[in-house]
Image (cartoon, rainbow, N blue to C red):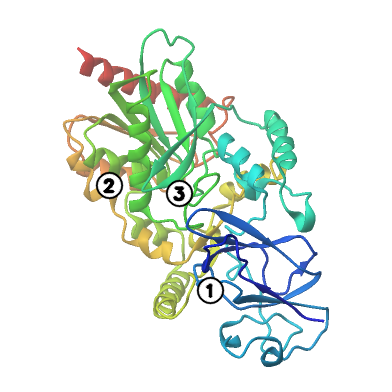
Amino acid sequence: MATVIVIPKLGLTMTEGRVGRWLKRPGETVQAGEPVLEVETEKLTVEVEAPASGILAHVLAEEGTTLPVAAPVAVIAEPGEELDLSAILPASSSPATSRPATGSTGAPVTLSREAVPASEIRATPAARKLARDHGIDLARVPGTGPAGRITAEDVERYLASRTAAPWPRGEPVRFRSDGYALAGELFLPTDISRPAPGIVLCTGIQSIKELGMPLLAQAFAQAGYAALVFDYRGFGASEGDRGRLLPFERVRDARAALTLLETHPAVDPSHLAIVGLSMGGAHALSVSAVDERVRACVAIAPVTNGRRWLRSLRAEWEWRTFLEELARDRRERIQRETPRRVPLSTIMPPDPETQVTLRELAKRMPDLPVDPDVTLDSAEAILEYEPEREVERIAPRPVLFVHGRQDVLVAPDESLAAFERAREPKRLVLLDGMGHFNWLNPQHPVFARVLAEATAWLQRWLAAESS
C-alpha cells in the first residue's frame, strides 16, 4: 500500500517548509524510520524519516522548493506496486513534477553517473561535523549505517586508517573562498620561534591535495617554509559544486589560501610564494600575475595554453570529434537542469606513464579519486585558459619554470612558450629523466633536483626581498 510523505509541521507558527536536500533517490529502497530528505525552516533544518518501508517511487518536489505544511513531497510504494497518483494525492497536488522510478507508472529513470550528483552523500549530522573538522571527504568513507549511511563511528575508523596513508600529513585547516569552506593541510617547519616564509602549493587537474602535494610540502617545511596544500572547491573534502573544473575559480581559491597564510601567526606575511604542479603550475602563474602578495613563483610542468595542451593529447580525428562533442553539449546545456559529467580522462587522456602511476596509486589507496567525474563544460573553460598571456605581468617579481624533457603529458613546449613571454627575473630548467609523475618519489634523483632548484630560487629572492 502506498504511503505519502508530507512537509511536517515543526512548530505552532510554521506554515511552510523548504525541501533542502533529498537523502534518497527515486527507485531506492527505504526503511521505516530512515531519513529520506531534509526540510528547512527559518530557524532549523530537520531530517524527515520514512513513515513506512518500501520503494521511493515518486519524488514530487525538487530541492529548493518551498511548500505549505502537509503538502505531499514523495510517495513510498511496495515493490512492484502499480500506482495511480490521482487517487493517492489531494486534488490540488500535481504529479506532473514527479520523477517516477522503474517499476512505477510513467517512464523509467536511468540512474547514470551523470544523473546522480556526487554531493548526495548520506551521513549523520555528527559524521558531517567530524568530517568537516578533520578535512575529510565523506565520499571516501564507507558507511555502515542503514542503507549505507555514514555514521560518526565510520568517520572515526577512517581517521584511524589515515595514519597508514603513503604520504605525509599536515595540520588540518579550513578556510573560505567565495563562501565555500576549503579543506587544507599546513606543514610547519620544526623551528617556529619566529614567523617563517609561506608557500601555497597548487595541485594539478585531479584537484585533490594528496596527489604529490604532501611530499613537496613536507620537503619545503624541512627547508624552513610553512607550506599549505588544499583541495579546490568542489573536490576532495572542500565544499562547492562537485566536479566544476573552472580555472578562474581555482585562481580565487589559491588567492584565498594566500590570505590564510598571510593571517597565520606562524607565517611572515611579507614573504609569501606560490608553487604549482601541472595545471596547478598554470594557476600559480595566473595568481602571481594579479596578486602582488606573491614575492616569488615556481611553476613545475605548467599548462600555459589550454587549447594547445588539449590539442596535443589527440590525433586530428580525435580533436575534431572532441570539439563536436563540446559544441553538442553547449547546445544541450541551455535545456538541461544539471551539467553533464564525464570522467576526467575524457577531457585529459592520460599518457601510458600517467596511466601506470594513477593505476598503482588507486591500488594502494582505492578510495582516492584519481579519475574524478567533472562537468563537461569544464573542457571549454580549459580551452579558453591562457596563463602564458599573463606571465609578463609577474615582473619584477621572479618566476621559475621547471619541466621534464621526457614529459609527454604536458610537453616542455608549454614552459618554453611562457618563458619566452615572461620578463626578468626568470629562469627555465629542463631536466633529463623527468616525466610528468615519475619523479614524485623522494627516492627518485629528479625529486631532489626539483626541490633543490625550487628552494634555491625561493631562498635567493625571498632573502633579497627581506634585505
Q: Residue at x 55, y 40 (%)?
A: 211
Q: Quadrant of the N terminus?
A: bottom right
Where residue 458 sits, quadrant-wise, is top left
Q: Residue at x 68, y 65 (%)?
A: 24
Distance from Cα at disc 3 to Cα at disc 1: 34 Å
Q: Is residue 54 left or right of residue 137?
A: right
Of mark 3 and mark 1, the one earlier in the sequence is 1
- The local secondary structure at tag 1 comes to strand
Q: Which mark is residue 233?
A: 3
Which residue is disc 2 drawn over?
Answer: 417
Distance from Cα at disc 2 to Cα at disc 1: 60 Å
Of mark 3 and mark 2, the one earlier in the sequence is 3
Q: Is residue 356 visible?
A: no
Amino acid type at mark 1 = Pro
Amino acid type at mark 2 = Ala
- The local secondary structure at tag 2 comes to helix
Q: Which mark is residue 160?
A: none
Q: Which mark is residue 68?
A: 1
Q: Nearer the viewer, residue 144 or 291?
A: 144
Q: Position of residue 46 (x, y in %)?
A: 61, 56
- The local secondary structure at tag 3 comes to loop
Q: Considering only vertical position in the picture, is 394 above or below 190?
A: below
Q: Position of residue 121 (x, y in %)?
A: 64, 55
Q: Residue at x 54, y 33 (%)?
A: 440
Q: Position of residue 372 (x, y in %)?
A: 57, 55
Q: Nearer the viewer, residue 218 or 186?
A: 186
Q: Residue at x 41, y 48 (%)?
A: 411
Distance from Cα at disc 3 to Cα at disc 2: 29 Å
Where residue 33 sits, quadrant-wise, is bottom right
